Structures are given as structure tokens and as C-alpha cells.
Image (tube, grey):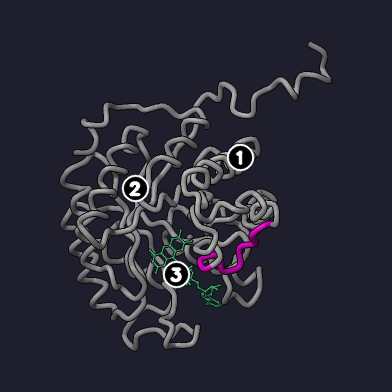
Amino acid sequence: MTAAQRPADTPLFGELPGDISVSFEFFPPKTEKMETQLWDSITQLAPLAPNFVSVTYGAGGSTRERTHATVSRLVRETDLVPAAHLTCVGASKGEIDEIVDQYWDAGVRHIVALRGDPPPTDEGVFVPHPEGYTCAADLVAGLKARHDFDISVAAYPEIHPEALSPEADLDNLKRKIDAGASRAITQFFFSTDAYFRFMDKALAAGIDAPIIPGIMPVTSFAAIRRMSGNTEIPGWLETMFEGLDDRPGPRALVAAVAAADLCKRLYDGGVRDFHFYTLNKAEQTYAICQLLGLRPKTNPTETAA
Ligand SMILES: Cc1cc2nc3c(=O)[nH]c(=O)nc-3n(C[C@H](O)[C@H](O)[C@H](O)COP(=O)(O)OP(=O)(O)OC[C@H]3O[C@@H](n4cnc5c(N)ncnc54)[C@H](O)[C@@H]3O)c2cc1C
């Protein structure tokens, strides 16, 4: 084989050693049917031995009980390390104390600490509860003072929409780490350049905690647009999904390929930790992990009931 032929003959995902770590994000189910889907997904993904599995918190604390129930069941019925998302929206510090005491007593040791989005009635401006935390950094400090939680926070490679400037957003991330967070998880993105540029700036700003890329396999373009904030949706991605609105099967396959391609480019740039926004579906995330060389470490029934 000549050197010129080699790149074309080298498979994109050939024989990766599986030297990656993963974490998975789920949302708390609303109905019995969704609950079944969630636990089926957890059972399928558990053998990949994630570092942790996180459960989101609905806007304004709307899923407080359901998040707690899901996280508690993870503690009771699996060997997985659960992480409970928690926001400052609409809660006093006393109410937050109560919630986190319950988590601590239930054996939960990892919190994803967030400010949360303002309710639509507040016209996009975050107004803290009069006796509440003002921002995520404030929440991290409060949580750390109460219990020795492992804390993750949010990061935005393409800048949070409310940030005054990219520098102010990085300063904010640094405050969250300095307040006691051990790592950041990013908003989803589709540009590896945006992630690596952000990593360079974070390092230059003295942030040495891991900043784990959040990977979102696209399942619905409308949903991605709604959730994207400042995340740029490249034209080529839109072209990839052209005409697939009413074809869920091919759409899911294309989405897995697009996300796997993003992960491979991150891998080639040295990334070894990946956080997947699973949307409570296992197939795409499992397939991407498989392509990245990860293999099951346990029998599914040993890890999740
Ligand atoms: C991985 C991940 C998981 C998420 N999970 C959830 C979830 O479960 N539930 C949910 O409701 N939302 C969730 N979100 C969304 C998140 O709540 C929103 O993006 C929210 O608008 C910001 O939260 P934050 O924790 O990043 O806030 P903060 O870090 O407090 O930042 C909010 C904004 O304020 C600015 N800011 C903060 N402090 C200062 C200051 N002192 N001076 C100047 N500017 C400042 C920041 O630059 C930023 O623009 C998640 C986001 C990510 C990336």
C-alpha cells in the first residue's frame, strides 16, 4: 500500500482501544410508559460502566419529586453513581438545604449545580428568589458548605446567551470551579473548533478542572433549534437531515453517525471523557460508544435491575 492510499483505506472507527470514559444524562419520566423506557435505557447503558449518570431538574424545580425519585431508585437498585441536577430557580436557600439533605441522606454524593433558566414570565431575565442563590457559583459554595458533594457545573463553548462577554463567561466558570466544582460539562455543540478554542481559553484563564464535552445525538431538528441557545447549527448538519422529518428510523441512524463523527474528531484531538445527552434512549448512545471502542464491562443484570 502506498502512503497516498493509506488514508482512504483506514476506517474512521477502526480498532479504537476503548480508552474513554463516559457519563450519561437522563430526564425524569412523566408517565409509566416513559418510566419503562428510561429504565430499559439505563439497563442497556449500565454495562458500559459510566463514571456517573445524571438526572435533570425541570425548569423552576418542576420535576423536584420526579428527579428525586429517579435518583433514589438509581441508588437503591443499581451500582451506578447517580448525579442529581439542581437549580436555584424559585427556591430559597432553606428549601435547597432541605433538598440536598434528602439527597445526602439517600446516599447521593454528586450534584450538577445550575442556576437554571428564568421562567418565561420573567422575559428572559433571571430574578433570584429573595432568599435564594443568585447564580450557580453561589449555589456551588452553598452546597459545598453543607455537605462534601462532588459537584459538576455547566460550561458554554459558544458562550452563555446572557453572558456580558466571552471573558465574563470564562470568569464565571472559574468562579464555579473555585467555589468547589470538580468538573464542568458543556452545552452541546457541533463544532470541534469551538470546543478546542474554548479549552485553550479556559486553560489560559487558569481553569484546570476537566471540561467534558456534552454530546447530543440529534433526534429532532426542531428540538435542537429550540434548545440551542448560542450553539451554532451548521448548514451541513441541516443538509444531513434534509427530508428525514417523517422518517424516524433513518433519522436516528444519521444522528448517530453525525454524533459519532463529532466524538471521533474530539477523540483525535485528545478528548477521552464524553457526556451523552441520551434523551432517555439507549440505542444511539450505545452505538456511538461501541464505535469509539468501548465495550460492556459487566453483565447488564448485575448493574441495573
Ligand atoms: C450540562 C448542562 C446541564 C443542564 N441541566 C439543566 C437542568 O437539569 N435543569 C435546568 O433547568 N437547566 C439545565 N441546564 C441549563 C442551565 O440551567 C441554563 O443554561 C441557565 O441559563 C444557566 O445556568 P448556569 O448554571 O450555567 O448559570 P450561571 O453559571 O450562574 O451563569 C448564568 C449566566 O450568568 C452570567 N453570570 C453569572 N454570574 C455572573 C456575575 N457575577 N457577573 C456577570 N455575569 C454572571 C454567566 O456568564 C451566564 O451568562 C443545563 C445546562 C448544561 C450545560
Q: CA distance from mark 3 to mark 2?
A: 22 Å
Q: Decide which of tag 3 and tag 2 comes sooner along the chain.
A: 2
Q: Residues within 10 Å of mark 2 (few under 14, many from 20)?
A: many
Residue 53 numbered tag:
2
Q: Residue at x 35, y 85 (%)?
A: 129
Q: Residue at the far top: name it.
A: 1
User: Is the C-beta separation of discs 3 and 2 under 8 Å?
Assistant: no
Front tag of 1 and 2: 1
Residue 261 numbered tag:
1
Q: CA distance from mark 1 to mark 2?
A: 23 Å
Q: In the rendered image of this protein, does residue 162 appear above or below residue 34? A: below
Q: Looking at the picture, which amino acid does disc 1 mark? A: Asp
Q: Position of residue 267 (x, y in %)?
A: 60, 37
Please say whether residue 241 is one of the residues in the magenta stretch: no
Q: Position of residue 31 (x, y in %)?
A: 23, 60
| Residue 201 seen in this snapshot | yes
Q: Position of residue 304 (x, y in %)?
A: 23, 38
Q: Which residues are magenta?
A: 226-234
Please state, as top left, top right, bottom left or bottom right, where the C terminus lies in the image: top left
Q: Decide which of tag 1 and tag 2 comes sooner along the chain.
A: 2
Q: Looking at the picture, which amino acid does disc 2 mark? A: Val
Q: Quadrant of residue 302?
A: top left
Mark 3 Cβ inside 8 Å of ligand 1: yes
Circle 2 sits in a helix, a strand or a loop, which is it?
A: strand
Q: Residue at x 64, y 24 (%)?
A: 11
